[in-house]
Structure formats: C-alpha cells, structure tokens
C-alpha cells in the first residue's frame, strides 16, 4: 500500500544557502566596523617604530640641477659668407675684441667696390657742376662788361644824333637807327642777366641734389664698410668661448648661430621640474645641495612658464658660490615647496613615515 513521504525542512541546498548568508553578514559587519581602517602585509624586519614627537613638517622635492654661467652670450653671424680662417676653438678664454673667425663674401665686396666707384663719380660730377657755375658767372661778367661798353657807345651815338637830328643835319632814319641800336643793347643786357639768373638757380638746385645723393651714398658706403668689418667675428665680451660650431670652408648665412661665450663672473643652477608642481614654484623658494661635504643654499630667481615634455625650467642663484664648482656639473637639488613649519602632534595620532623618491613625507591617521 502507498504511504505519504514527508518533505525535509533542512535540505543540503537550504543549509548551504543559510551558511552563505551568515558568512556574508559576518563579513559585512566586520567591514562596517573596520571601514575606517586599512591593512597592509609588510615584512616585520622592514618596520621601524619610533617615538611620536613634535617636529618640523618639511615638504620638498628632489630634482636634478645643472650648473650654468650666470650670463651667456650667443655669437651670431651678422653677415653671411664662408669661413676663411678659424683662430680660436671652444674652451679658449677670450677678451673683448679678440678675433675668433674670418669670413669672406665676394658679393658684399663687389657691392662695396661698385658703391665706392659711384661715390667718386658723384664727387666728380658735383665738382664739375660747381666749376661750371663759377665759369658761368665769369662769362656773365665778361658779357655784361662787353654789353655795357657797347651800350655806352650806342647811347653816346644816340644822344649825338639826337642833337644833329634836331638841327636837321641828319635824317630821321639815321637817328632811328642809333636809337634802335641803343634800345636793343639795353634789352639784351636784361635778357643776359635773367638767363644767367636761371642758369645759376638751376646749377644751385643740381648741386643740392648731388650733395644729398652724395651724402646718402657716403652713409650707405659707411654701412657697407661696417658690414665688411662684421665679416671678422670678434668676441663681444670677455669670458670662456664654450663652443664654436663651424669649420674652415663652411658656408654660413646671416643670423646663423656659430658659438657661445660664457661670463665666468658668476653661476646659476638650472633645474627641471615636473609640470605637476608648476603652480607651487615661484621666485623666493629655497633649495640646497651637498657639495664637498657642505650644504650649499640656493634661491629660486626665475621660473620659465613654458612646459616641454611634461617639465619646465627653473633658475636658482647661489647664496655663496662654492669653490671648485664648474659649468656643466649636475647635482641633486633639494627644492623646498614651502617653508618648514612646526606642526603639533596629537597623542592620539599615530604617524607612519615613508621614504619616497621625492623626499620625506609624513602621513597621519586618527585611531
């Protein structure tokens, strides 16, 4: 006969589900209770325990600095040409005015010769114009002298014939002939004076134009002389000729950089800083580095805002330049991001000190 089968209350599936729920609740409760704390498995030998004390909160980053001269002068070719002589190489000490390179430029030389020839032509033309003006003045005086003599004779004949004509000794035709001769000579004298005046004014105008053209030509020639002088590259200041980037026979263009002179009267430190700190770096911040067993202090003097490849440049000046430091040396510089401040430490605060690549940083967590 059939018998009823009783349904089991605690099946294996229900038991597993209950265990899972209980485990999840326990995990959730522990997570809530320990939510403000975190743990990290570390090697016991690497843990250092120290006494919590009041100290200085020192925030800094370590960057690489390169020693550079305080002032650098670039040598640029004012005029182009090819290098005919190279008298000094990089690394030589130079004084202001020392000859470094000699360039040659045939086109510039020919232009100078042509312009000089043009200047001499203008000088000759100006002198000829002045000479012609003086000759015209002498010719006018000679012409006027001859006309005055003829006029005096014609006037005397006219006056004498006037008396004879009044006495009916000569005819009216003879009297009119001497009268016309006298009037013609008088009118001719006035024409000669006006003509000479016009020629003189024209000559004076030509002289002024020639003088102006000559002055401009001389100025242009002087500038070309300066350009020819610029073919000799000289040191603008005294210092160290750190580099000369051309060789004999090389062709260079006007404005091309050919070298550099460093002023050895002072040094500065050029450092590169990650762009992450660009808003925190400003003139006046301090820094330091170790050199020959001593701590050398630095001060930020200039911040370059241009960011290249995620970094920007900062110039730092020495409080006192150490003996033996040289251009191009690179050292790790400890750059302060803020002035060290005294920070109070609560007895209920546990500090863990971690050494990181950018310096010592303190982190605190309440317990």
Image: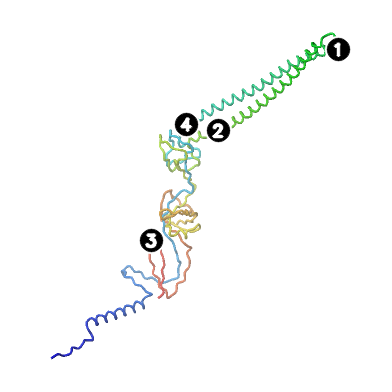
Which residue is label 3 attached to? Answer: 357
Q: Is label 1 in a helix, a strand or a loop?
A: helix
**Residue 106 versus residue 90: which sits nearer the camera?**
106
Along the polypeptide, which appears first: circle 2 or circle 3?
2
- The residue carrying mark 1 is 166
Q: Are marks 1 and 4 in contact (CB under 8 Å)?
A: no
Name above or below for residue 22 compared with residue 206. below
Q: Mark 2 highlights which residue?
A: 220
Give the spatial CA distance, label 2 vs label 4: 16 Å
Image depth: mark 2 or mark 3 in front = 2
* Mark 2 to mark 3 CA distance (whole Å): 64 Å
Bin the neighbour count of mark 2 within 10 Å (Cα to Cα): few under 14, some 14-19, many 20 and up: some
Name the image colouring: rainbow
Q: Quadrant of the N terminus?
A: bottom left
Badges 1 and 2: C-beta atoms under 8 Å apart? no
Marks 1 and 2, the one that precedes in the sequence = 1
| CA distance separating discs 1 and 4 | 85 Å
Is tag 1's residue or tag 3's residue first in the polypeptide sequence? 1
Give the SS element for disc 2: helix
Q: Which residue is under mark 4?
A: 107
Near-viewer residue (213 or 184):
184
Q: How many angstroms separate mark 1 from mark 3 (CA)?
A: 135 Å
Residue 302 drawn above or below residue 240: below
Q: Position of residue 288 (x, y in %)?
A: 45, 57
- Which quarter of the figure has residue 137? top right
How crowded pointer 1 is (Cα within 10 Å; few <14, some 14-19, many 20+) is rated as few
């Amino acid at each position: 006969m059939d018998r009823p089968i009783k349904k089991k209350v605690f099946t294996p599936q229900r038991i597993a589900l209950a265990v899972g729920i209980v485990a999840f609740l326990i995990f959730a409760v522990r997570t809530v209770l320990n939510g403000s704390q975190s743990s990290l498995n570390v090697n016991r030998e690497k843990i250092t325990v120290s006494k919590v004390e009041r100290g200085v909160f020192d925030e800094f980053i370590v960057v690489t600095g390169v020693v550079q001269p305080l002032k650098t002068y670039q040598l640029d070719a004012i005029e182009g040409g090819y290098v005919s002589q190279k008298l000094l190489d990089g690394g030589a000490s130079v004084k202001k005015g020392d000859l470094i390179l000699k360039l040659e430029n045939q086109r510039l030389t020919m232009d100078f010769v042509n312009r000089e020839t043009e200047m001499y032509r203008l000088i000759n033309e100006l002198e000829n114009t002045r000479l012609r003006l003086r000759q015209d003045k002498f010719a006018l005086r000679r012409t006027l002298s001859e006309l005055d003599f003829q006029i005096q004779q014609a006037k005397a004949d006219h006056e004498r014939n006037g008396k004879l004509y009044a006495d009916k000794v000569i005819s009216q035709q003879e009297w009119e002939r001497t009268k016309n001769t006298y009037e013609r000579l008088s009118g001719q004298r006035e024409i000669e004076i006006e003509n000479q005046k016009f020629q003189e004014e024209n000559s004076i105008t030509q002289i002024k134009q020639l003088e102006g053209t000559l002055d401009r030509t001389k100025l242009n020639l002087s500038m070309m002389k300066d350009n020819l002088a610029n073919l000799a590259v000289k040191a603008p200041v005294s210092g160290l000729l750190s580099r000369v980037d051309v060789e004999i026979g090389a062709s260079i263009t006007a404005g091309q950089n050919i070298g550099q002179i460093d002023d050895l009267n002072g040094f500065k430190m050029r450092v590169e800083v990650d762009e992450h700190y660009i808003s925190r770096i400003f003139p006046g911040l301090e820094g330091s580095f170790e050199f020959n067993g001593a701590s050398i202090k630095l001060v930020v003097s200039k911040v370059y805002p241009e960011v290249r490849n995620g970094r920007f440049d900062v110039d730092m000046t020495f409080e006192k330049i150490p003996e033996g430091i040289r251009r191009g040396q690179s050292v790790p510089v400890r750059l302060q991001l803020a002035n060290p401040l005294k920070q109070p430490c609560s007895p209920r605060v546990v500090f863990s000190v971690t050494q990181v690549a950018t310096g010592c940083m303190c982190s605190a967590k309440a317990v």
